[in-house]
Amino acid sequence: MAMTSAQPGYRVGGRYRLISVLGSGGFGRVWRAHDQVLDVEVAIKELQLLPGMSQAEQDKRLERTAREARNAVRLRAHENVVAIHDVVTDGLPWIVMELIDGRSLHEHLDMQGPLPVERATQLAAGLLAALGAAHRAGIVHRDIKPANVMLSTDGKVLLTDFGIAVHTTDTTLTTTGMLIGSPEYMAPERLRGIDGLPASDLFSLGVTLYHAVEGVSPFRRNAQPAALTAVLLEEPPPPRQAGRLGPLIIRLLDKEPHNRPTVEQALAMLGEQQPSRIPVPNSTKILPPGEVPVQGWQRKGIAVMMAIIFTLGVIGLMNTMGILGLTDVGEPWKYLRGIVVQHQTGVDDVWEVALGVVPITDITLAGLLCAQVARYIAPIAGKTVAIIGGTVGFLTGVGAVYFAFDGIAVLLAMMDTKHGDRIWVIPLIAITCVMLLTGGWAWESRKTRQSKRPRRHG
């Protein structure tokens, strides 16, 4: 397969004369060219295959070029999508596109700084219209970012570069563990390996709008791993210059896909209407306006309960290490172990044996909940790192509950509560109640997440 080395003046397909390079990226260059048949200027995208590429890598680039053309041409009539005019094979495929008199949002922000709120609102409306059309056509863009948004001199907003977009009928081109896209603009679920959701485009739109009004991406970090961590775990700083766009941006940046507004709901928040209402495919779930999923408070409840357990665990551990200096403290585990050992073969005392089993269940449940930290490790880190993260989380949860029993005993001693050999009763009841609540919320949250997860077809 020959590499391309086009120069100004070269005629692609004997028709399009290259004039100058407009921009370049990882997959090729975009040229200003002159269509000598129609006597108009166009933009033409040159695919580049780099020396040393394997045949498999070359084949993937070729298929991505064909996919970009197929997906973009489905939207060629939309006023907010850069139109594809032709695909020419001249050694390699060249994509002939509408030439936009203007610059990318990325270039505008670098040169002139953040957009005024009114202009950013127009930007949001245009991109939402483009995404609405794409999603109705079964296309997920997957790379919404300032560099892929064009601002024309006549005020139009256009979405471009469908190079990594997927259609519902497309097969995957992504190698396992390979990250495709710009990390700071990618949705958290994509980093966890869940791809092809329309809601992911809306998260990327939220990051782009935040960048447009604040002048910086909320997840911009000095290194890619830090950006990945920020997208997965950190809440963005509240936008300060977003004005009436603020509530929309905050909702678009929700970590959970089903909590984000749909295109129609986002347009309603802007006071806009879509030009026509076409049934949305089943891959996108439309929530009635004002409906708020219940999972948000469940996750907060789980966090609060686990924070209580960890606080009690730290108190218990500090006292065990002699840091608190409290010596007249009961030993809940000593009495619980006595119950289990004394009655492990007894039939008449099954109830007391059961009391010994309950704390073991509490410990195991805490460990399993904390092992969920593995869900927040990006697939690019590999399965080994995820397993290690899950194991560390499990052991941390186990240790927290174990020492939480002693932590409650420390608090009882500080309050001078009389306990005797029943010191284990209050910790057992308190921790079991906390873990029952936490486990129940985690289960309901899981069911909610599964029931609201969009189903992909095709």
Image (spheres, grey):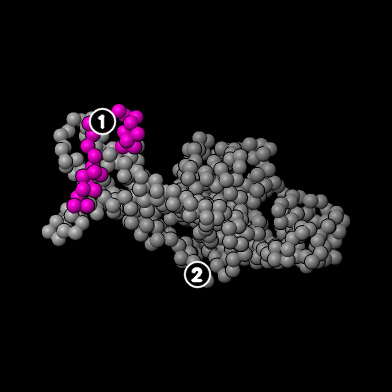
Q: Main secondary structure of the magenta part?
A: helix
- Label 1 sits on what residue type? Thr
Residue 293 in the image: state x and y as whole percent.
37, 53
Q: Which residue is drawn at 36% across and 51% down?
A: 367
**Disc number for residue 327:** 1
Determine whether, in the image, residue 268 is placed left or right of residue 53: left
Is any part of residue 39 visible from this angle?
no
Of pointers 2 and 1, the one earlier in the residue sequence: 1
Q: Quadrant of residue 323?
A: top left
Within the image, what quadrant is residue 113 found in? top right
**How far from the left and from the top, in percent, is residue 170?**
59, 68
Which segment did they paint magenta?
315-342
Residue beneath the point at 72% across and 49% down: 101
Magenta stretch encompasses residue 332: yes
Cα separation between marks 2 and 1? 64 Å
Q: Nearer the viewer, residue 201 or 222?
A: 222
Nearer the observer: mark 2 or 1; the answer is 1
Q: Residues within 10 Å of mark 2 (few under 14, many from 20)?
A: few
Residue at figure coordinates x 82%, y 62% from the top left: 12
Q: In which quarter of the image is residue 430?
A: top left
Q: In this view, does 50 lie to the left or right of 246?
A: right
* Residue annotated with mark 2: 457
Residue placed most toward the observer, 300 or 67: 300
Magenta stretch: includes residue 442 = no
